[in-house]
Amino acid sequence: MATSSSAVSSSSDKGHSAISPAEPAKTDIESQDSPSKHAAIASVDAPASDEDLSMEDNSNVPHLSLPRLFYFFFFNFGLFAWGGPVAQIALIKERLVIQDKWISLARFQRVFAVYQILPGPEAVEICMFFGCLSAGRIGGIVAGLAFTLPGFLLMLLASYVYSLAGFENVYFNASFRALQPIVAGMILRATHKIADHSVINHQTRKVDPFLVLAAICTAVNGALRINIFISLALYGVIYTLISRRLWIPAGLLFVLQYASYAVYVVFRGVPSPVSLALGIAKTPSLLNLFILGLVAGSLSFGGAYTAIPFVQVEAVLKGGWLAQSVFIDCIAIGNVVPAPLVIFATFVGFQGGLADGGLGNAFAGAVIITLGMFFPCFLFTIAGHSLLEKLVRNKLLAAFFDGLCGAVVGVIAIIAAQILKSSIQGFAGRVDTDAIKEAFDRVSQSGAIAGQFIFVA
């Protein structure tokens, strides 16, 4: 496999944007196939055939026992999953693709593209993909657990320590208050990184103005307190129509959303912040926490940053059982532990369980909401990557997901602005339901233009 190694290494040195999937795939196949197969391949389009074959080649994947598989992913990736999704995926790629050559670089790029569209943290899904290659579906679950477990345990410990010191200790609170504006800056940075691939037209490889418009309008809709579910679904449908050049229906839908909003404002007034919530976690019972994690995990397109506003509106605004400052603290902690950022849900579940029924309930709540948050990720991956690829290749669904991912950028941008505002004007201390409701009542009395200025400016 010396030829394959040099091809993969030379391709990887050029960076993600300069990789040509056909070349490493071609070298891999040429180093393994017989002359007869070369003759058969030569009679058709060689690069395309080689690429297709490399997508199914598992000859270099070691078949590990489940204990060895757990040990491998736990100590090679789980303990070193620092730095967010970009660093995590780079670590996995460097070890399994560049060094160990489990699969070709072209196949890895295809796998990564599929999981970018699906909800859930991509790093966990990629680990599960490799686990499935090595030991089947059970191996995928084991690899995902091994990658997630170190961060989960650290977040559980941090949640417990925070509950002991975070509410009463002035210095402890002050240190976290200093971190909160940094969290907003990190999310704004993530907005730019996600936009790098979310607003790109996959055919032209250039910025798509319609996807940029979807992101901007979704941010505006958030400032106007239009439910994020409506915006995500709407711009998915609108972009699907645009991709099929159905300009008139797309334009009518675009105008209809704001006409409907204007009618609602005339008869019902400006929506309150809690109108963004589904009301599935009014109290932090174990069942409600599981449902909250399950729905948030199913909406985590673009990673945890899409789940953040949903959990915030349910736990902080609608439920009132979690203080805004505490919620921002949990995101700050989630950014420093070696785990996907969605692990912030563990902290939310711990604090919710603590408010609902004491320390034992707090640990149970942390486990329950984490299971709910990761369940969609595990389900989609274990369901079969080949099936997911077929769904993503469907032009209708692919266009819908492209529009949805473009709208996600706007959701993340507006939540960054909200967190920045809260981190500067926020308050510390225990959960005070009356104070939270009073603050949001005052905000809800402002007009649409004032609300837009507060959250966007």
Image (tube, grey):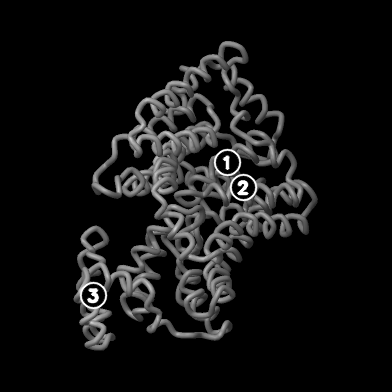
What amino acid does circle 3 point to? Lys
Q: Nearer the viewer, residue 174 or 258?
A: 258
Can residue 439 be seen? Answer: yes
- Name the mark nearer the viewer: 3 or 2: 3
Q: CA distance from mark 2 to mark 1?
A: 9 Å
What amino acid does circle 1 point to? Phe
Q: Which residue is mark 2?
A: 295
Label 2 environment density (alpha carbons within 10 Å; few <14, some 14–19, many ≥20): some
Q: Secondary structure at mark 1?
A: helix
Label 3 environment density (alpha carbons within 10 Å; few <14, some 14–19, many ≥20): many
Q: Secondary structure at mark 3?
A: helix
Q: CA distance from mark 3 to mark 2?
A: 42 Å
Q: Which residue is mark 1?
A: 310
Q: Which mark is residue 26?
A: 3
Q: Earlier in the sequence, mark 3 or mark 1?
A: 3
Please, is residue 358 above or below residue 177 in the view?
below
Q: Nearer the viewer, residue 417 or 411?
A: 411
The x, y position of residue 305, in whole percent, is 48, 47
- Name the mark nearer the viewer: 2 or 1: 2
The x, y position of residue 88, in whole percent, is 41, 64
